[in-house]
Image: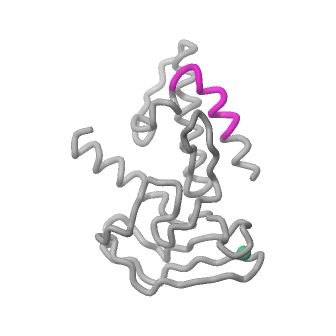
């Protein structure tokens, strides 16, 4: 992956780094990380907060440096508290994950577009879809991947 493409991909992922759904560390139910308007252009995130409406668990990070090696984007946990993402499922020995429903919808659109492309429709794949892992868009997996996404949507 050339650095520019990689940069673009990271930036696209950053667009979904908001209202991240995670597993509550206390009760295991769905909790939410509110990134307080953080954007790709900031090197510091402030007052990032995780809240669980089920058990009232909450925690706030006053200042998080995005340059810190602890800030990891592109894995199946949130980049701030490193809590496991709520929207994730294992398949083919890999993990399908999304930060939130908006992110999940985009993944679905791209995998579905690939499916339509296979069926003879021309469809322009751009943005994040061009960088999805191969197992996710491999022709033989697409229908299963779409089913898994459907299950996550109603989780
Ligand atoms: Zn909880």
How many numbered marks does the figure carry?
0
Question: Quick check: is 50 in the magenta stretch?
Answer: no
The residue drawn where x is 67% and y is 71% is: 24
Side of 46 relative to 53 (left or right): left
Q: Which residues are magenta?
A: 138-148
Side of 149 relative to 118 (left or right): right
Q: Horizontal and vertical percent for residue 4?
A: 23, 45
Position of residue 80 relative to residue 144, above or below, is below
Position of residue 33 relative to residue 128, above or below, is below
In which quarter of the view is residue 106 placed?
top right
- Write down which quadrant ligand 1 falls in: bottom right
Q: Horizontal and vertical percent for residue 16?
A: 49, 58
Looking at this view, name the residue that lies furthest to the top. 120
Side of 67 relative to 75 (left or right): left
Question: Quick check: is 140 in the magenta stretch?
Answer: yes
In which quarter of the view is residue 55 placed?
bottom right
Q: Quadrant of the N terminus?
A: top left
The residue drawn where x is 62% and y is 37% is: 91
Q: Horizontal and vertical percent for residue 80?
A: 47, 71
Position of residue 103 relative to residue 122, above or below, is below
Magenta region, mostly helix, strand or loop?
helix
Q: Horizontal and vertical percent for residue 151?
A: 73, 43
């Amino acid at each position: 992956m050339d650095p520019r493409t990689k940069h673009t991909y990271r930036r696209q992922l950053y667009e979904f780094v908001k209202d991240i759904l995670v597993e509550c560390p206390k009760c295991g139910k769905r909790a939410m990380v509110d990134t307080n308007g953080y954007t790709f252009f900031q090197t510091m995130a402030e007052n990032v907060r995780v809240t669980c409406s089920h058990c009232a668990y909450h925690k706030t990070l006053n200042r998080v440096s995005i340059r810190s090696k602890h800030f990891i984007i592109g894995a199946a946990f949130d980049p701030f508290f490193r809590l496991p993402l709520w929207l994730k499922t294992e398949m083919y020995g890999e993990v399908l994950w999304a930060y939130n429903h908006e992110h999940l919808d985009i993944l679905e659109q791209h995998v579905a577009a690939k499916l339509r492309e296979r069926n003879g429709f021309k469809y322009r794949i751009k943005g994040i879809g061009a960088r999805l892992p191969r197992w996710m868009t491999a022709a033989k997996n697409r229908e299963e991947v779409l089913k898994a996404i459907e299950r996550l949507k109603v989780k």
